[in-house]
Amino acid sequence: MSEGRRKVVIVPCSGIGKTYGTVSREAAYEVTEDMRPAQAQLVALSLLVLGDEAARAAVAGSPAVTIDGCKLACATKMVEESGGTVARDFAVLDVYRRHRQFKPKGIAELNEAGHELARVLAEEIVAVVDSLSRDDGGENA
Amino acid sequence: MPEFLETTVDKFIFRVATDRYYNSEGVWAQAEASRLPLGEGAGVRVRIGLSDFLQQRSGDVAFAEVQPEGTLLAFGDEVAVIETIKADISLAAPVTGRIVEVNPAMEIAPEVINQDPYGEGWLAVMEASAWESDRARLLDPQAYFLEMKQEAEEEAKRL
């Protein structure tokens, strides 16, 4: 990615104590720290809720991928309320419906199936990040 | 369209449809006007589903597995298991009888339970063999409403 190119913003669910929220965050970490650190950056939902200026600027200036842990869709709603553009919204539940063999359990620590589900979700997010990067002229297309 | 009893507990609104009966866990049973054709049994067709409170407390439904058509069940037997983002929940049959129809939406879009629990989110239709006696064991809408409200308020205090 060339210098100055916008990173795709990843905003996961902030549901603490919720298995699906944990899956959403683990997937977000995988994308932003391991799989596409140069093209994607994580913005904490809690910062958007607090009105943090840097977080709001990040979502306002870049396409966002949101990951919601439940139907309340807080991540998607907060990005929109913060002036951002949601390029793609993922729901952990929808991903699980397509991969029932990976039934997530656990909260602080996911079971192996939960880790697998997070990996599957991360791969789907990466495909979107790559697509957005191509649209943005990214060299990693 | 059914009418509802409604209460607000904390930030949640719970509705109880007044045109059906309930078991204490929140599975509803609604007798249909038409009886089964002769030759298919003389039982009453009873549609069953989850109350608004039960679906909200259970969380988003990922999968719903209803016993197949033809299954004979006694009152209280497991009629379905729903898997939600919170837990796997076993649901008890509110009537004795045979399952004659399973909502096809349960296979492809079980989230309809959350979206429309008293309408499109029904689980199954049972041919109830003892509707009158089963109905006497169920709660009428007002009784279920009071029980549900108390339960919701106690749960809100715990959180």
Image (cartoon, coloured by chain):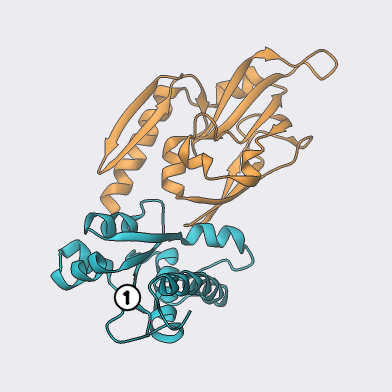
Chain colours: A cyan, B orange
Residue A12 visible here:
no
| Residue A13 spot, x, y in % from top left | 35, 64
What is the three-letter code of the residue carrying label 1?
Leu
Residue occupied by mark 1: A42
Where residue A17 appears, as percent x and y from the top left, is: 36, 66
Q: Is residue B47 left or right of residue B15?
A: right
Depth check: give the residue in front, B151 or A56.
Answer: A56
Residue A136 at x, y percent in the picture: 38, 72
Can you tell which quarter of the image residue A138 is in? bottom left
The front one of B131 and A131 is: A131
- In terms of image quadrants, where is residue A78? bottom left
Residue density around tag 1, few if under 14, some if 14–19, many if 20 or more, within 10 Å: many
Is residue A10 positioned above or below B15 on the image?
below
- At 61% from the left and 36% from the top, the residue drawn is B123
**Residue at the spot 44% in from the left edge and 80% down from the top edge:** A30
Q: Is residue B65 above or below residue A101?
A: above
Tell which of A34 and A85 is nearer to you: A85
